Image (cartoon, grey):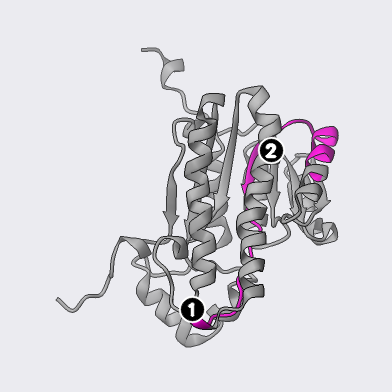
């Protein structure tokens, strides 16, 4: 075996699409992919919100494009994908970081409209973009898709039945797409983050009791940062992860490994 056979590459040359790229995990994923060599289409409901992310990507010497898109609309997603291909080139990588969290209530109090919102954005939005990206990836015989699920899709959190169901569906989606598209050379995986300091999670984490409880429950003893997820997204899109597909990966500081403080 020679040196070339043992070489590992983390370069992501090509075009990446990141949804929810204006802030939080999406912004971190966009920057991480750009650091590894990708040009990045930064997708958010309002394109103007992506100005900071675009500047960060361009500051790394990569091309960036801000795209406004309602991920729950197949028509808007298809139009956005066509524009990305026309301006940046065929899509090679996709990270679906757009997501919503509705109010914490017990299952019997979940509102119909909240279920519709969770399904439309978290599930349908991820599926719409996976289908749109696959139109570039399948003919090329290569591509990597990373769907953002949640630890709540693995071990449900109290008073989050609707959110947990939607994120569980995203995890299942990754497995299904991985099987369907393996013959085309595509990899599809899902990440399940723990609590991450993002604008969506901040209202919960800024409650001292909630933050302290999360710290106690996470064996590594800290809440995550967006870069903790962005780095894993970039790895799964790199050639170094070319044999990884259909995986639902907790990035949770050990939360789903077990209870860290049993009085034994």
Judge from the rendering whether residue 4 lies leftward or rightward of residue 33; answer left or right. left
The picture quadrant where one finds residue 250 is bottom left
Q: Do the residues labelled 1 and 2 touch (CB within 8 Å)?
A: no
Left or right, 121 with respect to 70, comes to left
Q: Which disc number belongs to residue 107? A: 1
Left or right of 176, for residue 125: right
Residues shaded magenta: 80-108
- Residue at (56%, 45%) from the top-left corner? 146
The 10 Å Cα crowd at callout 2, few under 14, some 14 to 19, many 20 or more, is many
Circle 1: element type: helix
Q: In this view, does 198 lie above or below 250?
A: below
Comparing 27 with 108, the one in front is: 108
Is 183 or 15 nearer to us in this picture? 183
Magenta-drawn stretch contains 7: no
Residue bearing the label numbered 2:
133
Q: What is the quadrant of residue 110 in the picture? A: bottom right
Quadrant location, the C terminus: bottom left
- Disc 2 on helix, strand or loop? helix
Residue 163: percent from the left, percent from the top?
A: 54, 68
Mark 1 or 2, nearer chain start: 1
């Amino acid at each position: 075996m020679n040196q070339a056979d043992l070489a590992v590459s983390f370069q992501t040359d090509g075009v990446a699409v990141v949804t929810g790229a204006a802030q939080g995990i999406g912004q971190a994923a966009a920057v991480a992919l750009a650091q590894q060599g990708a040009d990045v289409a930064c997708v958010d409901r309002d394109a103007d919100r992506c100005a900071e992310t675009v500047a960060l990507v361009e500051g790394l010497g990569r091309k960036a494009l801000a795209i406004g898109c309602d991920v729950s609309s197949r028509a808007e997603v298809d139009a956005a994908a066509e524009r990305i291909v026309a301006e940046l080139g065929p899509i090679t990588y996709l990270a679906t970081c757009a997501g919503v969290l509705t109010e914490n209530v017990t299952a019997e109090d979940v509102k119909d409209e909240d279920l519709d919102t969770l399904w439309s954005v978290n599930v349908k939005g991820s599926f719409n973009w996976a289908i749109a990206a696959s139109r570039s990836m399948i003919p090329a015989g290569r591509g990597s898709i990373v769907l953002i699920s949640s630890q709540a899709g693995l071990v449900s959190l109290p008073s989050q039945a609707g959110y947990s169901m939607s994120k569980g569906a995203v995890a299942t989606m990754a497995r299904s797409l991985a099987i369907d598209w393996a013959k085309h050379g595509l990899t599809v995986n899902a990440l399940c983050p723990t609590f991450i300091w993002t604008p969506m999670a901040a209202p919960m984490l800024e409650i001292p009791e909630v933050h302290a409880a999360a710290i106690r429950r996470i064996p590594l003893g800290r809440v995550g940062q967006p870069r903790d997820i962005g780095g894993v997204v970039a790895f799964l899109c790199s050639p170094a992860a070319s044999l990884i597909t259909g995986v639902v990966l907790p990035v949770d500081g050990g939360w789903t490994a077990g209870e860290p403080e049993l009085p034994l």
